Image: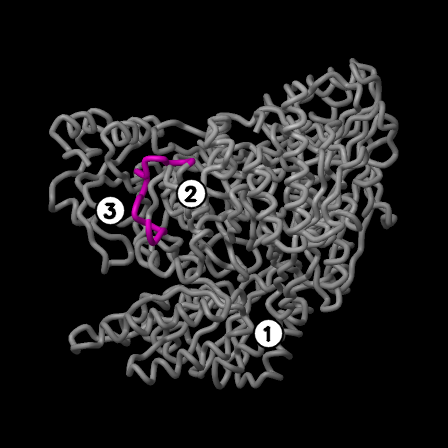
Amino acid sequence: MDAATKSEASSLHSALRHKFIALAGNGYARSATAADAVAGVQPKLVVEPGTAQELAEILRLSNDAGLAVIPRGGGTKLGWGNSPAHAGLILSTARLIEIIEHAWADLTVTVEAGCTIQRLQEALAQHGQRLALDPLWPEKATVGGVLSTNDSGALRLRFGALRDLIIGVTIALPDGTLASSGGKVVKNVAGYDLPKLVTGALGTLGVITRAVFRLHPLPRYMRSFSVSTADGVEMQQFVLAVQNSKLAHTFLQSHFSIDASPVSDILFEGTEAGLNAQDTQLRHLSALTRIAEATTSTWTAREELWASADPATTAIAKISILPATLARTMELVKRTAKEHQVGWKTLMYATGLGWLRLEGKPDSLRAALQTLREELQGQGGSLVALYRPEKMPAFDAWGDAGDALPLMKAVKQQLDPKHTLNPGRFVGGI
Amino acid sequence: MNRMEARIFDELRGIVGDRGLICSPEELHTYECDGLTNFRVMPRAVLLPKTTEEVQAIVRICHRERIPFVARGSGTGLSGGALPVENGIVISLARMNRILEVDFPNARVVVEPGVINLDVTGRVSPQDYFYAPDPSSQSICSIGGNVAENSGGAHCLKYGFTTTHVLGLEVVLADGSLVHFGGKSLDSPGYDLAGVFVGSEGTLGVATKVILRIVKRPECVRTLLAAFPSTNEAGAAVSDIIAAGMLPAAIEMMDNLAIQAAEAAVHANYPNCGGLLLVELDGPVAEVEALMTHVNEICRSNGASEIRLAQSDAERALVWKGRKAAFAAMGRISPNYIVQDGVIPRTALPRVMSEIERLSKEAGVRVANVFHAGDGNLHPLVLYDRRIVGQEEAAEALSAQILELCIAAGGSITGEHGVGEDKKKVMSKMFAEPDLATMQRVRCAFDPLQLSNPTKIFPTPRLCGEKPGEYVPHPAESAGIAERY
């Protein structure tokens, strides 16, 4: 950039900033600091609009001015995905935090995108209900962020993913359109299902401003158990036996690591009579394995996988496999980790989704991730690298999007033709 | 639209053979409508491909010649989704009806679109699995049609809709290209195009392969019938069941007219009452029995005069037979009827019901009510006699008013039958212009020439490339620095 262009750009930003202040109010548009950096890229401005309309207007102005926009909720997963090609504006949903309507008798809630999961759950619990989802860091993570990253945990086995829980959405598009799709009722097939389109789209199609969810009752009683097995093969047998049984478990997750034998946690919810019966059945089913009442750490297993890590030597990936390939995949992880001299630990759900932590030198981490991705993709699965150390050689976060990639790009082109939103962060350079 | 010349017919015949091409007017009559028979359009031809490659070859010709096409499964749809379009062809997937793969350890089944819904369950039931979505037409409707409509059914309250159970799709796009959405494993990288495709009513392409999730049968299933003086008491019981934190496998409600019709048709042995509730719980025996006791108490405290628990599988099947036959049974009590499909928040039920009753009295047109009460999905059946002058118009007007009640209550114009041809004019009452424009932009990404089931869903089709709203050029654009796409 020559000096003249630079000064032109800076006056553009200053003019925009004034417009943003006029829209969002004084104190809600500021220059970005180092703390606002996104995957190593420094944005210029941070704006916190007070309404969805303001947000849409700010997005439109940015789009017109060619300013790349990074939507931000609680910022807990802002590093997921590839580094943005450029970053002009952080568009924060920090002020869009209202729980608009908890229709508890209809088991639905309408909530603004910036509301944290924890705050939402606390409000729902007042009527004995919950959003049946266990995302990472609920005290900071927001509705919009969790939707955009499609973050789900162990409860997905029973209640489905966000795609199964969201029933309506409002998004702001780069041209300033505020569009709604879905509705407030659980059953509804009118029009295209755009709530599913934006779930997991990493904010590349529009900025979610509000969502409507179907809810579930809080459980009356809960009981969980830990089951340990000698090796991966035995663990797979156990998991498949539970899945093929008449047990009505709420979640089933298994821990594997370099230095311990596999352990799985299983959770039941229901009436006391139902729990007693299932307790007996489980013990009958797992006669060969060791079984004990589980500790509370069961609930935080995924956060622990993220927490106890040295950021400079750790990589974390989400992997997807078929449940019946669990033992083979864990063997593959073990073999690959050994070959590249990295430590490893996984948390695998009975759905076939799981989380992998690798520890070692950045070069070795990359090599191990590359090998694992190729192997998993070869069997129809995937590996998405969500955290990579700064010094790790370049490695695409997503992997292969298959033959639908041109269509995905066409969808992007229709909704965000100037590539204003999160440019370059998603699959295939979207 | 080009005229379809002999050359094109020859080309099509070359793809599907003589037996795969229907173009004689007598045979084409079968395809001029779907389950919604008041809309009829004669297609130019019907093609019956047997493979994905044949579907691609047909669609490529359509693309080249700009011929619109409509995919069709069993033709049981109730919104005119499979209604042919003027000068277009119909691609029937009825001959692509193989179950390609059954994978029990991973609980996945891969099918072609013409496979009948109930045949999936039939195939996996020896291993104690089932395919959960169960529309009333499940013994004849196809999986491809279910995908197009995102079909529900009585048990979707607990188990979810077709979209919950479709993990992956092979799709022929409108230009003939083949793409794959999702897969056997979850969360493939990229946009959830399977989620967008399911329920798109054939407007985004033709599904040629579907990866389904199957579900293990619960340890036990218990079905309770409770007779109430009216639907109001029955509705109150439903609210109490939900408020008690239960998620039944199904909650169905029928009013007196619907009961009479079902009795006349299949002798389900329903109690004669003003509001009948059918509650089904499933899961581990101990759990279900504890909860069933609770449901029983709730029904009794809301004024149920008679409560019956189906004592055997045969009794259970009979109870369901009555419910699933309810639409067709209307023929027993009325020469003609309209099947409506609307959704309201469950809590609005008493208000909307009494409003329907008022409108029905006012118009002098009877309405029988069958609901999926657990999720607020109403199926009012508007009864009339075409031979009486003015009745048909009165019935249509009443049916439309019922939909407006649903919209006003914050609900939806369709819970499971789809928009199709039938309800596209009402879409603009449920959605604002920017909402519909955004959906159409998605459509333009899939099918820029709008050849795949055009004229459905949207009230005013938009040409792709047309920009909504006023166009104001950006200064950078005027200066030639930037350009719009």
Kindly identify which numbered label has been placed on residue B471.
Answer: 2
Mark 3 or 1, closer to the camera = 3
* Residue B123 seen in the current view: yes
Q: Are marks 2 and 1 in contact (CB under 8 Å)?
A: no
Q: Based on the displayed image, in which of its 4 quarters is residue B405 positioned?
A: bottom left
Mark 3 or 2, closer to the camera = 2
| In-front residue for pair A279/A12 | A12
Q: Is residue A122 left or right of residue B14?
A: right
Residue B230: in magenta span: no
Instruction: Report the residue at 85% width, 36% height from top.
Output: A307
- How would you classify the magenta stretch by its main secondary structure? loop
| Residue B433 in picture, x, y percent from top left | 42, 54
Q: For the N terminus of chain B, which image quadrant?
A: top left
| In-front residue for pair A9/A375 | A9
Q: Are marks 3 and 1 in contact (CB under 8 Å)?
A: no
Q: Which amino acid is tagged 1?
A: Ser
Q: Based on the displayed image, in which of its 4 quarters is residue B247 positioned?
A: bottom right
Q: Which amino acid is tagged 3?
A: Pro
Residue range of the region highlighted in magenta in the rendering? B445-460
Instruction: Report the residue at 64% width, 22% height from top.
Output: A4
Q: Badge 3, how many Cα within 10 Å: few under 14, some, many 20+?
A: many
**What residue does disc 3 label?**
B84
Name the chain under label 2: B
Name the chain under label 1: B
| Residue A341 in picture, x, y percent from top left | 83, 15
| In-front residue for pair B293/B399 | B399
Kindly identify which numbered label has been placed on residue B239.
Answer: 1
Q: Is residue B450 left or right of residue B481?
A: left
Vertical order, B313 against A387 (above or below): below
Name the chain under label 3: B
